[in-house]
Image: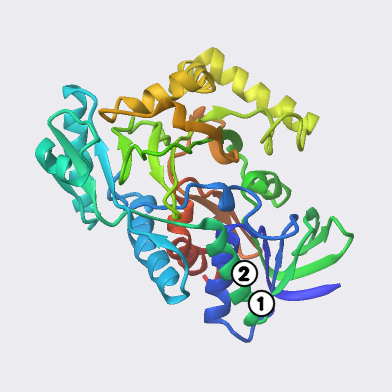
Amino acid sequence: MIRVDFLIIGGGIIGLSIARELINRFPDKKIALLEKEPDVAYHSSGRNSGVLHAGFYYTADSLKAKFTREGNTQIREYCYENGLKINECKKVVVAKNEAEVETIFELERRGKANGVKVQVIDEKELLEIDPNVLTTQFALYSPTTATVDPVEVNLTIKNELVRKGISLFFSEGYYRSLGSNTIETTKNRIISGEKIINAAGLYADRIAEDFGFSKDYTIIPFKGIYLKYHGEHKTVKTNVYPVPNLKNPFLGVHFTITVDGTVKIGPTSVPALWRENYAGMDNFKLDELIAIFGWEGLLFLTNSFNFRSLTFDEIRKYQKKYFIGLAGKMVHQIDSKGFSEWGRPGIRAQLLNKRTKELVMDFVVEGDHHSVHVLNAVSPAFTCSFPFAKYVVDNYIIN
């Protein structure tokens, strides 16, 4: 049996960030991290857009608002300190019609309440930032939005943890709880931790159930795919987002400029049928299909949070003409033929409240003095990871 002070399950950006926070505070403690994949960044932590969000979408009383603002600064600093790639490409949010203009001002109010640098600009000012971007009367300008390489960031944190003496177990996942803060891994290894921290992403709710948590929650996976541009004339110079529906966690089809300058549009937010339903029958699990399809069927029938219309609209996005057309509403001209390659799919681990049948919009952590469970590290969890890790350690691990 291996005995450690802290055992972290999950080597995504949240698990890595919690491990980093712990080893920086307690360099003499024994820390182990368990990851079922051969390396870090195999799932959403390495499949996201790499955008460092600014933090103006969220109300000031939300954890997202605080963590996004702080995380934007901290991840940016980490990249510069470690010589990692970063594209200071900024961002604008545009309105398609007059009805959306009020939301532009609401986003500015939220941003300023959160201490985020944002500014409402008019059409003339938008023209100076990017002459091809189209808006109705006003747009919101975010100068602190940037993009990084998420895989590079994850690998750099992993290497930092190795240097600081954390034990990393790859290709070895959680199998079951044996009680008394002891688990068995998929390689039949027995590990005991004074504190077990569950940051397993898509499987966080299932692991939490073994410890008596996540009674009101289940994870519903949503698949996101981008279309990459390979033409000669890039459509935009900056990230361009539509005015979002503030009642759901999806930001709509938008233009993203990656860290290497590639322009892409997306993502989709299609309800997936099992947790790692990336393509075809890959990673198929019948029990997951039955459980997830059951919940999605119920949401479809009840049309909770407009799930029915969301599903139909998201499925339509697999038609390139329709998908590109949504992005085309935000620009004067678009080279439709240049958007020719579907990117690597990602899966969002979105928490559903089983009682209210609503998607949970903010971070959710449950636990006791034996174990801690990160149930909802929803987008923009990548941006939020460093301050969120501090929050988890402060409020759930050392308390």
- Disc on res. 162: 1
For the view shown, which residue lies furthest in the top direction?
301
Image position of 81 (left or right of 69) = right
For the view shown, which residue lies furthest in the bottom direction?
28
* One can see residue 306 in this view: no
Residue located 74% across and 55% down the image: 37
Q: Name the image quarter holding the N terminus.
A: bottom right
Q: Quadrant of residue 285?
A: top right
Q: Nearer the viewer, residue 247 or 134?
A: 134
Q: Nearer the viewer, residue 9 or 319?
A: 319
* One can see residue 319 in this view: yes
Say few, some or many: other residues with alpha carbon within 10 Å of mark 2 (under 14 / 14 to 19 / 20 or more): many
State yes or no: discs 2 and 1 in contact (Cβ < 8 Å). yes
Q: Quadrant of residue 233?
A: top left
Q: Secondary structure at mark 1?
A: helix
Q: Nearer the viewer, residue 146 or 55?
A: 146
Q: Find disc 2 in the rendering and name its residue.
A: 158
Residue 388 in percent (x, y) is at 46, 61
Say few, some or many: other residues with alpha carbon within 10 Å of mark 1 (under 14 / 14 to 19 / 20 or more): few
Q: CA distance from mark 2 to mark 1?
A: 6 Å
